[in-house]
Amino acid sequence: MSSEAAVSAAIPPELSGMVRSTRFADGVATIVADASGLGKAAGAQLERELQEAVGAVEGVDEVRVALMADKVQRQIIVVGSGKGGVGKSTLTTNLAVALAREGKKVGVVDADIYGPSQPLLLGTTNEKVRAEGQTLIPTQSGFGVKVLSMGQLIEAGKAIAWRGPMVGQALSQLMEADWGDTELLIVDLPPGTGDVQLTMLQKFKPAGAVVVSTPQDLALIDATRAIDLFRQAEVPIVGLVENMAGYLCPECGAVSDPFGQGGTEAAAKSLDVPFLGRVPLAMEIRVASDTGRPPAATDTEHGPHFAGIAAHLARFLGTVKG
Ligand SMILES: Nc1ncnc2c1ncn2[C@@H]1O[C@H](COP(=O)(O)OP(=O)(O)OP(=O)(O)O)[C@@H](O)[C@H]1O
């Protein structure tokens, strides 16, 4: 058998479907393989296996493997707020879960260094983050959503010591992880307009920003600031969401408005950004979230609120490129 034929014959049958061409000249075997949809880790394994199998052929001094991969068109959406505690993380999780239920391949990046909460919200707190070399491998939650969190990179209680370059590096590690075939990354930003936001906007150029607010004036003033930041960075505003609107008393059924009512929709109008919908203040949302059961995973009372907002986001994504 010629060395060229021996190189082809050495490729394990289970890998031969991915091999597009083989060449052999002057002791060098060159193999081109299609690694589309494999992700970085599986792609690296394919490369190793080809190296090993072909490297064992007599007369082969060097194996060069070239992997062709489809570049996944991955969109980035950031979820921000001016003020903490208004429900940004809750909304991020539920938008991701609602879109995953519609068949979209979604990942969540928890970039909130001051209060990382996505592993709790997506029920993955017991999963340890894995890495392949320097590349992090996102954790698969039970809701079809992959997740990585700043909380997995920072020792609890140390966030305050994190400044500029460290924050940027950590964020890049999360964004450049092995997201495989993920089409959409939804990023849960910290509140306000600090280092994480700046790195995110400058380095990763999100396709759009969703801004969350409660209906009270104070939160709306801060939300306006967040919108200003996105506008300055030329990130399109997907729209404003009103959270914690209208509290339905589980005892007497009366509806009250602890944070006021309708303020976010009015603010959206005056800021000339779309209003994406409102989510009521409800004990079940808090309890379900704290126990890693996102309401959007169900068709019960509160699932549809998030599904409606997710539908707006899906329409927006359909109108923008990468
Ligand atoms: N609509 C809602 N009804 C009831 N509780 C809610 C609702 N939205 C959020 N919460 C609860 O309010 C708290 C704060 O929510 P969340 O962590 O999502 O806010 P955040 O804006 O991300 O806060 P942070 O500033 O800490 O990042 C959580 O305990 C959450 O379960």
Image: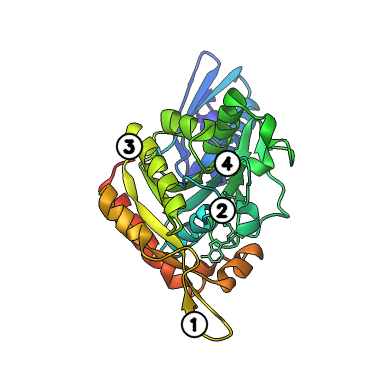
Mark 1 or mark 4, which has the lower sequence index? Answer: 4
Q: Are marks 2 and 4 in contact (CB under 8 Å)?
A: no
Q: Is mark 2 within 8 Å of ligand 1?
A: yes
Mark 2 or mark 1, which has the lower sequence index? Answer: 2
Q: Is residue 277 above or below residue 20?
A: below
Mark 2 or mark 4, which has the lower sequence index? Answer: 4
Disc sitting over residue 42 in the figure: 4
Image coords of residue 138 (percent x, y): 60, 46
Residue at the disc numbered 1: 254
Amino acid beneath label 3: Arg
The residue carrying pointer 1 sits among few (fewer than 14), some (14 to 19) or many (20 or more) residues within 10 Å by Cα, namely few
Residue at the disc numbered 2: 85
Amino acid beneath label 2: Gly
Q: Judge depth for marks 1 and 4 and give the one in front.
A: 1
Q: Classify the position of the C terminus by image quarter.
A: top left
Q: Element type at marker 3? A: helix
Label 1 to label 4: alpha-carbon separation = 55 Å
Residue at the disc numbered 3: 231
Image coords of residue 16 (percent x, y): 51, 42
In the depicted view, which residue is nearer to us: 132 or 36?
Answer: 132
Q: Judge depth for marks 2 and 1 and give the one in front.
A: 1
Image coords of residue 57 (percent x, y): 62, 26
In the depicted view, which residue is nearer to us: 18 or 144?
Answer: 144
Q: Element type at marker 2? A: loop
